[in-house]
């Protein structure tokens, strides 16, 4: 579990293909503190398991499904990536609940300065936008951000100077593809609100049913 508060910007040192996966090498410093083999580190918002520690970085396995759903396949040596260690139980929860399981990608379409901030507009598919709400949370390349605007084709976030300096977001140009993870709460609510199959429709089935709602005055 992560919070979307990026700890540092790392640099890709290599991508090595194996028979079953891609091994991603990443130069880092801060996130190596206390990290052991098997620990999780979010790379551009993608939860990767540390499979090897080097003196100045780490390596993580990336399965084919992750390569298809994220922008990791577009990375090259020297690409800069946002890094965050898994949340410590005794740490501050500064962002929101981030699983590191990317829902899909979006495309930056515009960056517009306003005062000390920069508006970033991201287009996304309907199956992503349905879970994005104004003033809700969204994770872009591992960065926890507040949605300031959303419609049927895109959403916008406003980036303060600190976030711009500590992450990669404002170094991107229109057309750049970013990883998106929607707030997990909305996805669970949607699933639980769907009527259960008839063979499962009991009041103790763990989900809402039409009979339950009717019997309690909701229909």
Image: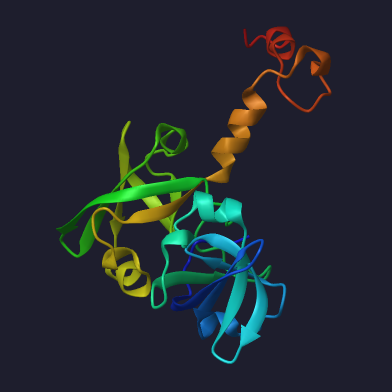
The correct choice, above or below, for 107 with respect to 197 in the image is: below
Question: Where residue 198 sits: x, y (%)?
Answer: 78, 12
- In the picture, measured across the screen, residue 161 lies left or right of residue 138, that is left
Q: Quadrant of the C terminus?
A: top right
At 70% from the left and 21% from the top, the residue drawn is 208
Q: Quadrant of the N terminus?
A: bottom right
Return the residue nearer the eye: 114 or 177.
Answer: 177
Q: Is residue 86 visible?
A: no
The correct choice, above or below, for 148 with respect to 24 in the image is: above
At 57% from the left and 54% from the top, the residue drawn is 66
At 50% from the left and 82% from the top, the residue drawn is 28
- In the picture, measured across the screen, residue 55 lies left or right of residue 157, that is right
Q: Is residue 163 visible?
A: yes
Question: Where residue 20 sits: x, y (%)?
Answer: 66, 61
Return the residue nearer the eye: 26 or 190.
Answer: 26
At 74% from the left and 13% from the top, the residue drawn is 212
The correct choice, above or below, for 151 with respect to 100 in the image is: above
- In the picture, measured across the screen, residue 167 lies left or right of residue 174, that is right
């Amino acid at each position: 579990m992560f919070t979307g508060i990026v700890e540092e910007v790392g640099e890709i040192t290599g991508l090595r293909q194996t028979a079953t996966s891609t091994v991603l090498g990443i130069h880092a410093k801060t996130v190596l503190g206390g990290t052991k083999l098997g620990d999780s580190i979010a790379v551009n918002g993608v939860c990767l398991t540390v499979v090897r520690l080097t003196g100045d970085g780490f390596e993580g396995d990336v399965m084919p499904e992750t390569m298809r759903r994220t922008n990791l396949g577009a990375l090259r040596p020297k690409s800069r990536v946002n890094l965050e260690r898994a949340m410590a139980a005794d740490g501050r929860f500064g962002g929101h609940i981030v699983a590191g399981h990317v829902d899909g990608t979006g495309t930056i379409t515009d960056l517009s300065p306003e005062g000390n901030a920069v508006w970033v507009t991201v287009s996304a598919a309907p199956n992503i936008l349905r879970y994005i709400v104004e003033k809700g949370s969204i994770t872009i390349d591992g960065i926890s951000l507040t949605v300031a605007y959303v419609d049927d084709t895109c959403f916008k976030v406003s980036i303060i100077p600190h976030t711009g300096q500590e992450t990669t977001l404002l170094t991107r140009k229109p057309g750049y593809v970013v990883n998106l993870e929607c707030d997990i709460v909305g996805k669970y609510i949607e699933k639980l609100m769907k009527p259960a199959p008839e063979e499962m429709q009991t009041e103790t089935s763990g989900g809402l049913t039409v009979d339950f709602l009717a019997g309690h005055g909701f229909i």
